């Protein structure tokens, strides 16, 4: 009897000790950390036990900007029993977790990413002369240059691809811009007009004007597009959410120049154009800095971020040029050339982005940004030399589902 009582006492002590140990690991509060967006702290501190028995809080952050897998980023010195994992979307900030040891439960997605943007840009050129004017009415000749008055133009940009739970994405991107401009003048006495820049024909351009009533009208056209096929990876660096990638790019840019007028009453005309088609590589990077404590992966939540991105591509291909000049007589001259050429494109974007996680689990985002694109070596309407810039802004709607 004494033996049975002693054994029973031992069993009761073991049960009490086990119950205390299990209960001390049962209620773990999840608290938002003020260190960065999407970072949570799990602690076994409880109102029912003495503070000295608690383990310091453990901080966790999603291993990717678009997954709910948690990885520890700050471990207490006296913690050596393992790691906690938990789906962020199933626990709101401040709730109590009944079981701290949870299996990994990644946030499953269909794996589709898409976006569409309206880009508003204004073309700019090193030299984009529509025509020049010589005023010969005085003692000296005064030469004035008249440029094409380009305005802001809307251009579409679309991307479509696949993305996995770790942020690895394969996408196709397309951008296209078409624009044109025109300028002209009518001559009083002793005014002479010239086309924008000399052509490569034997005539080397046209000369209009000479008497009152002579005129010149000029137009220019610009068409360009890019097609990218790339791979990218999303990564977290504490408070920053980043994307790095690269791939293949095909680009084309064509520009045309047309001038028509009269020289002492006789018609003159000049047409010139050039086109570049090339293939090459493209690399890019993007950084997002969340503002405030918002969970970008939990259903029904939203967040706002500052964003910046840079992209660079190097292209190699062929450049084709053609020109036809018609002077009174009639005198007609033409020229055609083809040569190898390299061209580079640099792009910068700075703005803000708002993310919205729908109840279906889809991530929808809206971005407003300033944009700059520089086509180095693209030339202008009447010349193959010089650079083309596209400056403006964009509104983008995207989805990750």
Image (cartoon, grey):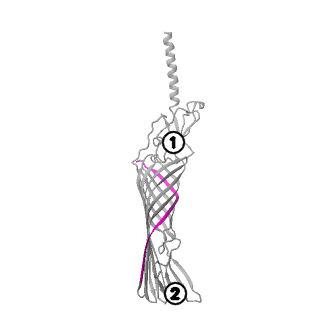
Q: CA distance from mark 2 to mark 1?
A: 77 Å
Q: Residue at x 53, y 44 (%)?
A: 39
Q: Position of residue 324 (x, y in %)?
A: 42, 79
| Percent of width and height locating residue 264 | 46, 89
Front residue of 281 and 1: 281
Q: Position of residue 126 (x, y in %)?
A: 53, 71
Q: Is residue 227 above or below residue 326?
A: above
Dot 1 crowding, Cα within 10 Å, few <14, some 14–19, many 20+:
some
Secondary structure state at the residue bearing disc 2: strand
Residue at image coords 52%, 53%: 287
Magenta residue check for 354 = yes
Residue furthest top as drawn:
1
Q: Which residues are magenta?
A: 332-360
**Is residue 304 something that shows in the picture?**
yes
- Does the magenta portion include 181? no
The vertical placement of 158 against 102, above or below, is below
Residue under label 2, please give it. 191
Give the structural element (helix, strand or loop) at label 1. loop
Question: Chief secondary structure of the magenta span?
Answer: strand
Choose between 358 and 157: the one closer to the eye: 157
N-terminal-most mark, 2 or 1: 1
Q: Which mark is residue 93?
A: 1
């Amino acid at each position: 009897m004494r033996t049975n009582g002693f054994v029973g006492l031992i069993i009761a002590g073991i049960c009490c000790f086990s119950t205390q140990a299990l209960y001390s690991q049962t209620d773990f509060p999840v608290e938002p950390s003020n260190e960065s967006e999407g970072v949570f702290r799990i602690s076994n501190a409880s109102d029912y036990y003495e503070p000295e028995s608690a383990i310091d809080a453990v901080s966790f952050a999603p291993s990717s900007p678009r997954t709910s897998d948690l990885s520890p980023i700050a471990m207490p010195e006296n913690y050596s029993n393992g790691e906690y994992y938990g789906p962020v979307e199933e626990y709101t900030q401040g709730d109590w977790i009944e079981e701290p040891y949870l299996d990994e439960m990644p946030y499953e997605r269909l794996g589709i990413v898409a976006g569409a943007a309206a880009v508003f840009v204004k073309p700019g050129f090193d030299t984009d002369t529509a025509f020049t004017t010589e005023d010969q009415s005085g003692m000296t000749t005064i030469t004035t240059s008249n440029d094409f008055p380009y305005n802001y133009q809307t251009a579409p940009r679309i991307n479509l691809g696949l993305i996995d739970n770790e942020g690895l994405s394969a996408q196709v991107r397309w951008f296209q811009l078409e624009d044109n401009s025109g300028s002209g003048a009518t001559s009083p006495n002793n005014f002479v007009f010239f086309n924008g820049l000399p052509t490569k024909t034997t005539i080397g351009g046209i000369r209009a004007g000479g008497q009152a009533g002579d005129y010149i009208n000029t137009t220019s056209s610009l068409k360009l597009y890019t097609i990218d096929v790339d791979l990218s990876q999303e990564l977290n660096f504490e408070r920053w959410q980043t994307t790095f990638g690269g791939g293949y790019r095909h680009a084309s840019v064509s520009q045309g120049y047309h001038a028509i007028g009269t020289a002492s009453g006789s018609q003159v005309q000049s047409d010139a154009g050039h086109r570049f088609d090339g293939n090459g590589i493209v690399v890019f990077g993007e950084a997002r800095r969340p503002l405030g404590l918002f969970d970008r992966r939990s259903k029904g939540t939203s967040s706002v971020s500052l964003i910046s991105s840079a992209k660079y591509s190097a292209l190699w291909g062929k450049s084709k040029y053609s020109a036809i000049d018609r002077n009174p007589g009639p005198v007609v001259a033409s020229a055609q050339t083809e040569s190898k050429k390299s061209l580079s494109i640099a792009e910068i974007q700075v703005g803000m982005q708002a993310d919205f996680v729908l109840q279906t689990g889809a991530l929808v985002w809206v971005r407003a940004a300033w944009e700059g694109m520089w086509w180095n070596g693209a030339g202008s309407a009447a010349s193959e030399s010089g650079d083309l810039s596209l400056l403006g802004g964009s509104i983008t709607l995207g989805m990750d589902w």
